[in-house]
């Protein structure tokens, strides 16, 4: 990923495997908070990760529901609505954002668009919700 794609708070994949939240952005690295295992114990960790090791999290129904989108229509497209009624997402899992016309294929893109539209962060409650 590139520095200009990310904001603090964006959710990303580390090494295409572990999900985490960006807590700081530097020129070639990002600090990422994630759940990691050390000596058999799982705990929250924070590491400085090179951008080359970071990748987008694909936007799926599971992620939309974690962000408290509500499924409102199912056929032929699946439509989701943000609980505050700000906007809708129509999704055949080649995601596109309904009336705004932007292509949204990853979690961080949805987070960034939501922030641009509302001035508020689109978050899930905690890293406890970041399970495969």
Image (cartoon, rainbow, N blue to C red):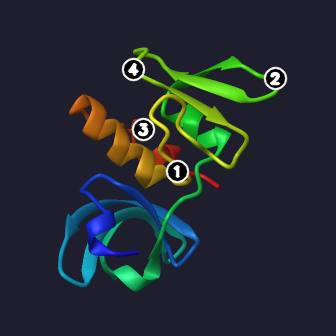
Which sits earlier in the primary sequence, circle 1 or circle 3? 3
Residue under the image location 53 percent in, 26 percent down: 69
Quadrant location, the C terminus:
bottom right
What secondary structure is marked by label 2? loop
Q: Position of residue 19 (x, y in %)?
A: 49, 61
Q: Furthest residue to the right?
A: 76
Residue under the image location 70 percent in, 46 percent down: 93
Nearest the eye: 94 or 123: 94
Question: Does residue 73 lie above or below 121 as drawn?
Answer: above
Quick one: label 2, few (<14), some, or many (20+) residues within 10 Å? few
Residue indicated by mark 2: 75
User: What whole-number distance in Å separates the C-alpha atoms at marks 2 and 1?
Assistant: 29 Å
Nearest the eye: 120 or 37: 120
User: What whole-number distance in Å separates the C-alpha atoms at marks 4 and 1?
Assistant: 24 Å
Give the label, 4 or 1, closer to the camera.
Answer: 4
Which sits earlier in the primary sequence, circle 2 or circle 3? 2
Identify the disc placed on residue 124: 3
Give the label, 4 or 3, closer to the camera.
Answer: 4
Question: Does residue 24 lie above or below 98 as drawn?
Answer: below
Quarter of image, res 62: top right
Identify the disc placed on residue 130: 1
Nearest the eye: 91 or 107: 91
What secondary structure is marked by label 3? loop
Quarter of image, res 31: bottom left
Residue under the image location 35 percent in, 54 percent down: 10
Question: Does residue 68 lie above or below 49 as drawn?
Answer: above
Quick one: label 1, few (<14), some, or many (20+) residues within 10 Å? some
Which sits earlier in the primary sequence, circle 4 or circle 1? 4
């Amino acid at each position: 990923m590139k520095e200009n794609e990310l904001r603090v708070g964006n959710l990303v994949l580390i090494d295409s495997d572990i999900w985490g939240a960006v807590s700081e952005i530097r020129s070639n690295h990002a600090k990422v908070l994630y759940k990691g295992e050390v000596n058999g114990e799982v705990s929250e960790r924070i590491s400085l990760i090179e951008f080359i090791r970071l990748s987008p999290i694909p936007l799926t129904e599971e992620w939309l529901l974690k962000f408290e989108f509500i499924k409102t229509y199912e056929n032929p497209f699946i439509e989701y609505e943000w609980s505050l009624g700000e906007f809708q997402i129509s999704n055949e899992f080649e995601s596109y954002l309904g009336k705004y016309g932007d292509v949204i294929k990853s979690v961080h893109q949805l987070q960034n668009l939501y922030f641009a539209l509302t001035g508020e962060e689109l978050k899930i409650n905690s890293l406890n919700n970041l399970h495969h």
